Image (cartoon, rainbow, N blue to C red):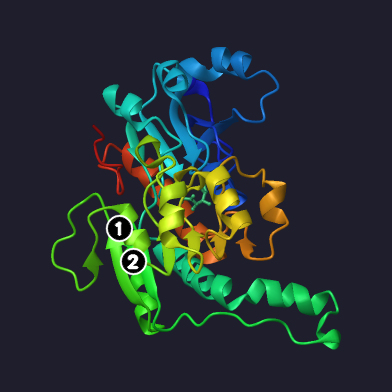
């Protein structure tokens, strides 16, 4: 019975289902107070669900893995889904909220680190920084100097999605002398940055296009062949948001044909699989979804997950709920 279960600390424990790979920085700190069932590692996930499902009151999710409607609806006592991520596109939030299940995420605390990586990418791709390091390590310096890069100062940065992260990148990019414009589906009020009415218009007016909008069905594939063609043969695409926002085959074609100059990608459609074509391209910077991966930020994200769960199970309002979705 649920109320006879005790956590590692010996206290009566609440049972949680873990559906995403999550770091010890979170799990170790939850263990004294909760019993955590690892759905991903279960040899027989269905058997695990029929055993513990009736007692599970919370789900631990992540940015790339969250519960779908089936899983949500198979847990009769489910009250809360706490995602250790700002993005909640991996969780079926509509299904959860329709059942009165609270969904929480971890906004704000990762904005600075994600924006730092995006700014680094804005410099790395045009300046060919990763490529130049490979050049040196391959011993090519002794046979001649590498080709030239492109200055970012004075160039036009187009930001797709001017939310918390988009704005934080814009502030950094201003310091580097970039001219900033954006496209966003939400009205942004008075800003000094120029707004374009469509993504296509923004791409046509950009030298560097940064993808910083939310993932999910509404943004799947919106950076398509037309947008890349509008960005043009001297343009760079930067993505630190979600892989599926970009039509990946179209991006590969655009890079292969010189329709754009280069790209820097922290996220990919189908990650952690990386298309061989992208791996082979010198003009593409690739990192394994590390934008929020610092000790400080991961600790702050874990703190928020822990505080959201603690508040909820103490009968208090959670700190960072995902707003109601249509
Ligand atoms: C994480 C993320 O790497 O916050 C997000 O939405 O994508 C990243 O910060 C990851 O999802 C951790 O769960």
Q: What kind of element bears circle 1?
A: helix
Is the CB atom of the residue marked by disc 1 within 8 angstroms of ligand 1's nearest atom?
Answer: no
| Residue 165 seen in the current view | no
Q: Which residue is mark 2?
A: 205
Quadrant for the C terminus, please.
Answer: top left
Against 26, residue 48 (above or below) is above
Residue 103 percent coordinates (x, y): 35, 36
> Could you say which is closer to the camera, residue 263 or residue 68?
263
> Could you say which is closer to the camera, residue 70 or residue 192?
192
Q: Which residue is mark 1?
A: 201
Using the rendered view, name the quadrant where residue 164 is placed: bottom left
At 40% from the left edge and 58% from the top edge, which residue is drawn? 230
Against 137, residue 96 (above or below) is above
Q: Bin the neighbour count of mark 1 within 10 Å (Cα to Cα): few under 14, some 14-19, many 20 and up.
A: some
At 45% from the left edge and 18% from the top edge, which residue is drawn? 70
Residue 85 percent coordinates (x, y): 45, 48
* Mark 2–mark 1 CB contact (< 8 Å): yes
Residue 16 is tagged as none
At 36% from the left edge and 65% from the top edge, which residue is drawn? 158
Against 113, residue 278 (above or below) is above
> Could you say which is closer to the camera, residue 47 or residue 293?
293
Q: What kind of element bears circle 2?
A: loop
Q: State the CA–CA distance, disc 2 to disc 1.
A: 6 Å
Residue 263 percent coordinates (x, y): 55, 62
At 34% from the left edge and 71% from the top edge, which residue is drawn? 170
Using the rendered view, name the quadrant where residue 111 is placed: bottom left
């Amino acid at each position: 019975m649920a109320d006879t279960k005790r956590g590692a600390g010996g206290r009566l424990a609440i049972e949680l289902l873990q559906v995403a790979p999550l770091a010890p920085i979170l799990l170790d700190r939850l263990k004294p107070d909760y019993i955590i069932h690892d759905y991903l590692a279960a040899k027989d996930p269905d058997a695990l669900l029929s055993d513990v499902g009736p007692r599970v009151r919370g789900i631990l999710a992540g940015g790339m893995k969250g519960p779908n409607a089936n899983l949500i609806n198979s847990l009769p006592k489910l009250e809360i889904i706490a995602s250790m991520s700002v993005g909640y596109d991996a969780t079926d939030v509509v299904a959860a909220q329709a059942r009165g299940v609270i969904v929480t995420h971890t906004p704000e605390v990762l904005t600075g680190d994600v924006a730092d990586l995006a700014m680094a990418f804005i410099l790395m791709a045009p300046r060919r920084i990763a490529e130049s390091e490979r050049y040196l390590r391959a011993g090519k310096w002794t046979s001649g100097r590498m080709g030239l890069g492109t200055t970012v100062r004075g160039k036009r940065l187009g930001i797709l999605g001017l939310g918390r992260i988009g704005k934080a990148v814009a502030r950094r990019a201003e310091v580097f002398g970039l001219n900033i414009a954006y496209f966003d589906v939400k009205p942004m009020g008075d800003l000094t940055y120029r707004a374009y009415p469509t993504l296509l218009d923004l791409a046509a007016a950009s030298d560097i296009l940064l993808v910083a909008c939310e993932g999910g069905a509404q943004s799947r594939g919106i950076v398509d062949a037309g947008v890349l063609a509008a960005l043009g043969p001297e343009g760079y695409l930067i993505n630190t948001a979600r892989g599926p926002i970009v039509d990946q085959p179209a991006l590969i074609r655009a890079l292969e044909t010189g329709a754009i100059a280069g790209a820097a990608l922290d996220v990919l459609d189908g990650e952690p699989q990386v298309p061989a074509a992208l791996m082979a391209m010198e003009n593409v910077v690739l990192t394994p979804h590390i934008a929020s991966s610092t000790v400080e930020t991961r600790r702050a994200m874990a703190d928020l997950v822990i505080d959201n769960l603690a508040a909820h199970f103490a009968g208090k309002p959670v700190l960072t709920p995902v707003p109601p979705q249509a």
